[in-house]
Image (cartoon, grey):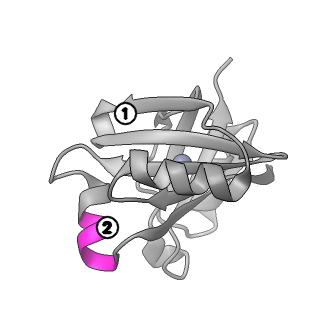
């Protein structure tokens, strides 16, 4: 079962500069900076109430974020839904005809395992499933 929107992922060109704006906007400080080498991204997390914002900056030109910025520019990149059973959600969504980018969960930022759905099966929105690592 999906529990809530865990975070919104936002593609930025320069994480330090965007952080200044988001920290001022939200009135809070970034609680974690983390690079995910396998995805070619640097991430920064801010928390506001129960919700989080994940800023994403590309660390190389082949990074999915670099391609997204070229195609669409800065802005909302993905919506992440939290689950406590990512394997069964992957199975449920596959059975319902959704196309998964990741057939099995992989390591993500912020102590999560994650899987992405292909935006062509979700009306153009990149959807992330995430589960806290135990
Ligand atoms: Zn995310």
Residue drawn 40% across the image and 48% down it? 15
Q: Which mark is residue 36?
A: 1
Location of residue 129 with respect to 108 vertically, above or below: below
Is residue 8 in view?
Answer: no
The percent position of residue 59, horizontal first and vertical second, equals 24, 43
Percent position (x, y) of residue 129? 61, 49
Part of the protein shown in magenta:
67-72
Closest to the observer, 89 or 132? 132
Mark 2 vs 1, N-terminal side:
1
Residue appearing at x 46%, y 55% in the figure: 18
In percent of the image, x 29 and y 35: which residue is there? 38
Instruction: Tell me what residue is drawn at x 65 percent, y 38 percent.
Output: 29
In the rendered image, residue 112, in percent from the top left (x then y), is placed at: 58, 31
Is ligand 1 less than 8 Å from the beta carbon at label 2? no
Q: Is residue 119 something one can see in this rendering?
A: yes
Q: Main secondary structure of the magenta part?
A: helix
Check residue 71 for magenta coloring: yes
Q: Is residue 66 above or below residue 111?
A: below
Give the side of residue 83 with respect to residue 73, left or right: right
- View extreme (bottom): residue: 123
As for residue 104 lying within the magenta part, the answer is no
| Residue at image mark 2 | 68
Tell me where residue 25 sits by quadrant: bottom right
């Amino acid at each position: 079962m999906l529990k809530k929107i865990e975070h919104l992922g936002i593609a930025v060109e320069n994480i330090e500069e965007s952080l200044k704006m988001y920290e001022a906007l939200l009135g809070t400080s970034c609680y974690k900076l983390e690079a995910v080498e396998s995805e070619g991204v640097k991430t920064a997390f801010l928390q506001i109430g129960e919700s989080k914002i994940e800023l994403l900056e590309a660390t190389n030109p082949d990074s999915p974020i670099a391609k997204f910025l070229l195609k669409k520019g800065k802005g909302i990149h993905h919506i992440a839904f939290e689950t406590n059973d990512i394997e069964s959600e992957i199975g449920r969504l596959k059975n319902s005809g959704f196309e998964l980018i990741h057939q099995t969960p992989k390591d993500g930022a912020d102590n999560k395992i994650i899987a992405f759905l292909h935006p062509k099966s979700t009306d153009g929105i990149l959807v992330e499933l995430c589960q806290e690592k135990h």
